[in-house]
Image (cartoon, grey):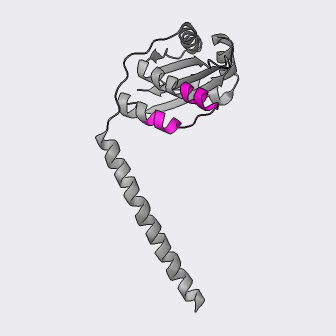
Amino acid sequence: MKLNLLPKTMLFLALFMLNSCSSDNTEAENLSAIVKPELVLNYTYNLAELETMDLINDYRASIGLNRLEKINHISFKSEEHDIYMINNKVFNHYDFYARSENIMKVLGAKAVAENIAFNYDSAKSVLNAWLNSPKHKVNIVGNFTHFGLAIKKDSVTGEKYYTNIFAKI
C-alpha cells in the first residue's frame, strides 16, 4: 500500500516544483525584456590600464592576431567588478554571468570572457602571469574584437585588483 502512494506523492511534488519555478522565471524574463541596460559612454583610464591594454594588443599583434578595440562600457563593467572584490575582500569571478549578459544586451556581443588578477606590480607582470596560465591565455588570444580593463587599488591595503573583459562584437 505504501509503495502505491510513493509514486503519486513524488509526481505531485514534481508538478508543484515545476509550477512554482516556472512563474518566477517568466516574471524575470518579462522584466529583463522591459528594462534594457544603459550604455556607459564615459570611463577615465589610468596609465596602468592604458599600458596593460597596449601590452595585450602588442602581444596579439606579435602573433598575427587583430588588435582589440577598447570600449568604455566594458571597462566600466570591469571597474564594477574590481569595486565589488575590494569591498567584499574577495578575489573571484562572482556574477560574471550578469556582466556578460549586460555586455551582450547593450553592445550586441556574441561572446564574452574575463580574466582577473590580484596585486601585480606592473602591466608587464600581470600580462606575463596571464600568458603563463593556459586558461587566461585562451582569452587573450581568443577570437575577440573588443575589450575593457579596470585596475583599482584597495585604499586600505594598497593591493591592486584587475578585471579584463573580452568581447566579440
* The N terminus, quarter of image: bottom right
Above-or-below relation of 31 to 89: below
Above-or-below relation of 110 to 55: below
* The C terminus, quarter of image: top left
Residue toward you, 13 or 133: 13
Residue 105 highlighted magenta (yes or no): no
Residue 99 highlighted magenta (yes or no): yes
Q: Is residue 104 left or right of residue 5?
A: left
The residue that appears at 49% across and 76% down in the rendered structure is 11
| Outermost residue to the front | 156
The residue that appears at 37% across and 34% down in the rendered structure is 105
Magenta stretch prevailing secondary structure: helix
The residue that appears at 55% across and 7% down in the rendered structure is 47
- Where residue 107 appears, as percent x and y from the top left, is 37, 28
| Residues rendered magenta in the picture | 82-101
Q: Is residue 2 left or right of residue 76?
A: right
- Where residue 28 appears, as percent x and y from the top left, is 37, 49
- Where residue 135 appears, as percent x and y from the top left, is 64, 31
Above-or-below relation of 154 to 44: below
The answer to whether any part of residue 18 appears in the image is yes
Give the quadrant of residue 57.
top right
Give the quadrant of residue 69.
top left
